[in-house]
Image (cartoon, grey):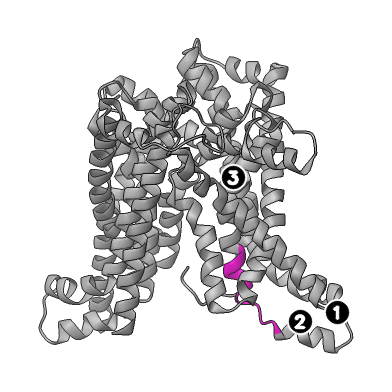
Amino acid sequence: MKQPGRILLGLFCLLVAVWLVAPTIVVVPMSFNDKKSLAFPPSGFSWQWYQNFFTNPEWSASLVGSLKVAVVTAVFATVIGTLAAFGLDRMKSRVSGVLRALLITPMVVPGVVLAVGIYAVYLDTRLVGTMTGFVLAHTMLAVPFVIIAVSASLEVFDKRLETAAASLGATRLTAFRTVTLPLIAPGILSGLLFAFVTSFDEIIVALFITSPYLKTLPVQIFSSITRDADPTVAAVGTLLFIVTSLVIGAGLLIGSRQGKR
Amino acid sequence: MATITTDSRNTGPAVAADDRRRWFRGQAFWLVAPALLLLVVCLGLPLAIMTLRSFSEPQWGWQNYAWFFGTPVNLTVLQRTFAISAWVTLVCLIAGYPYAYVMTAVGPKMRLVLILCVLVPFWVSGVVRTLAWVILLQDSGVINSVIRAVGLSPVKLIRTQTGVVIGMAQVLLPFMILPLYSVMKTIDLRLMQAARSLGASPARAFAQVYLPLSLPGVYAGAIIVFILALGFYITPALLGGPRSTMLSTLIQNQVLSLLNWGRGGAMGVVLLIATFVLLALAAPLSRQPHKTGSTR
């Protein structure tokens, strides 16, 4: 009696899974297209779009721009977010609840609204198209992710360990450096990764504050899609997919090894 | 401030500990201060300036809001923004609820596969994903090839509202599935067995036992999907046509193309208020009655 229902449920899930994954997979064959078109399936095989990505200065400049912004953003956001997570952890719960909600608002403010406001401020302060401008905006957007990641590992951190270290004569700084930091390092690391990805993938604010001198990769992808059917975009997508898979795979591997130890 | 003064009634050795704690709390504030400063400079100031301009340009007054609510096109777009968001939320719920349930019911290996399927969309840049939807939905695209192969007549998907909903729902589905799953995995399935053994039909056991217990996850997922959908910009801009424009596109157009900061600002304020009113209304609904075990 239960079997048909189960099979139906299974098929439904398969369909949802395909729907979730299909857009990621479909980009891969497109990137080897031999013609400048996005028709599917591609008519022949070539590497030219990968060559184009690495040799065309427009693409390589935007990749370098994105990497610079994302690295600096990730460092700033991780420091600011980790400090904030520690502060929130040591506050009265009512105060920290309000502050936490406040600090996480960048996640729910509609992107275009935020972009319009930031663009207005940057026009007045001449920050449009500058590294400082990008890093400021992206750090603000990335800090909530760091706070969430670090708070999660602080929640399971046993504070008596710090007290124990202090009772053995460690100063606050020593206790922090040798006891607390190593134990919450996974949280900080995942916060750092989240911050990097947030900046690397951010497009709406970037579209507003971009300039010919500083362009990020998503902006370049967007303008390429709106301009013409250029399979280079698919090549970029495939490369990003492979790099991310490798990073996540390595993370899982390290994680499972540590788990076994 | 009042709370601090009432604290100082403590006497004896407690005072020292209390002083220490208060000093600690004062220090805690300084740890949060950089994040708050950044928030004020990069979020508070921009939103304040946008709001100011919505009242001050071209001259002081409510003119931009009168224009917004007095122009039928704007009201159509506002209504459409809410309608598309509601559709996306519904599609995500219909697809996500059974999926999240199956995640709780299968073995650990299969669960890992299902979780990976949810997370894979995050691995690829959002813009690239939208490009993939262009490839899939276009008139000569994959979906229409399949439809034609089956022998049906092709459907217009790109530059339509249906196409926008399909693309947006795929991007937002993980935000529905993850809260649903985190609530569902805390539900004790023996409760369903108990209901069955007491004579309830499977449908009734589901409706009266499982569904109410899973509602916090439904609310949490629905509200986050709806709010994120309201502010969507990239997907409607690339997949939609003139008849599926959403509010974000209109705002961008006013500011970047028409340089009309007053009108663009007024629309931004409307979208912002809508977002926060919804958030405030829905926040109590999604609060879980019991704390879930996992930190995810």
Dot 1, how many residues are within 10 Å of its Cα: few (below 14), some (14-19), or many (20+)? few
Residue contact at pointers 1 and 2, CB within 8 angstroms:
no
At x 53%, y 67%, the residue is B113
Q: Where is residue A169 in the image (x, y as percent from the top left)?
A: 10, 83
| Local secondary structure at mark 3 | helix
> Which quadrant holds the N terminus of chain A?
bottom right
The mark total stands at 3
- For residue A33, above or below residue B4: above
Rounded to the nearest angstrom, the CA distance separating label 1 from label 2 is: 17 Å
Horizontal and vertical percent for residue B178? Answer: 56, 62
Element type at mark 1 = loop
Image: magenta residue range: B180-189
Q: Mark 2: few, some, or many residues within 10 Å (few <14, many ≥20)?
A: some
| Residue where numbered disc 2 is placed | B192
Q: In this view, does A118 lie above or below A249?
A: above
Among numbered discs 3 and 2, the one appearing first in the sequence = 2
**Which of A43/A118 is in front?**
A43
Instruction: Mark yes or no: residue A252 visible.
Output: yes
The residue that disc 1 covers is: A1
Could you say which is closer to the camera, residue B105 or residue A80?
A: B105
- Residue at position x 26%, y 34% in the image: A65
Q: What residue type is labelled 2?
A: Met
Amino acid carrying label 1: it is: Met
Q: Where is residue A117 in the image (x, y as percent from the top left)?
A: 42, 28
Q: Nearer the viewer, residue B69 or B75?
A: B75
Residue beneath the point at 62% across and 64% down: B180
The residue to which callout 3 is attached is B227
